[in-house]
Image (cartoon, rainbow, N blue to C red):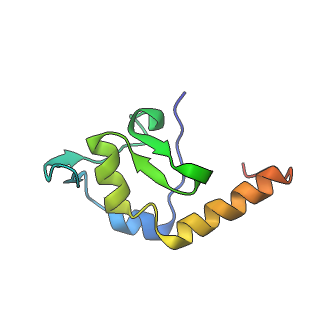
Amino acid sequence: MRTIAAACYPCNRLNWHRTAADDPATGQAVRLFNPRTDDWEEHFRWGRGYLTILGWTATGRATVRQLKLNREDRKRQRRLLRGAAEAGVVSWP
């Protein structure tokens, strides 16, 4: 199953026209994750508590770094969404 997510302006601005970035583990340029063609579970894992996203492949690592997916505002948002889900609130959509 493929998941397509809407991107917020700050994330979209960080990616903008880029299709590749350096893998922080190797320094090699690799393509960035494409939600239209790639499988999230292949490239990423959730960290403890579902607050951080871990790059599982070169593409995943480069994408996490390039889009700054673990910045504090994103972790705060994930914490709030998780709390709401645990309280039984149905999230969008």
In the displayed structure, does residue 63 sit left or right of residue 1? left
In the rendered image, the quadrant that contains the N terminus is top right
Q: Is residue 2 above or below residue 92?
A: above
Taking depth in this image into account, of 43 and 92 the one nearest to the observer is 43
In the displayed structure, does residue 68 sit left or right of residue 49? left
Q: Position of residue 91 (x, y in %)?
A: 75, 52
In the displayed structure, does residue 54 sit left or right of residue 51? left
Q: Position of residue 2 (x, y in %)?
A: 51, 32
Taking depth in this image into account, of 39 and 46 the one nearest to the observer is 46
Q: Position of residue 60 (x, y in %)?
A: 35, 45
Residue 77: name its quadrant. bottom right
The outermost residue toward the top is 1
Q: Is residue 78 above or below residue 60?
A: below
Q: Residue at x 37, y 61 (%)?
A: 67
Q: How many marks are shown on the rendered structure?
A: 0
Q: Residue at x 31, y 39 (%)?
A: 57
The outermost residue toward the front is 48
Residue 79: name its quadrant. bottom right
Q: Residue at x 56, y 65 (%)?
A: 75
Q: Residue at x 45, y 70 (%)?
A: 10
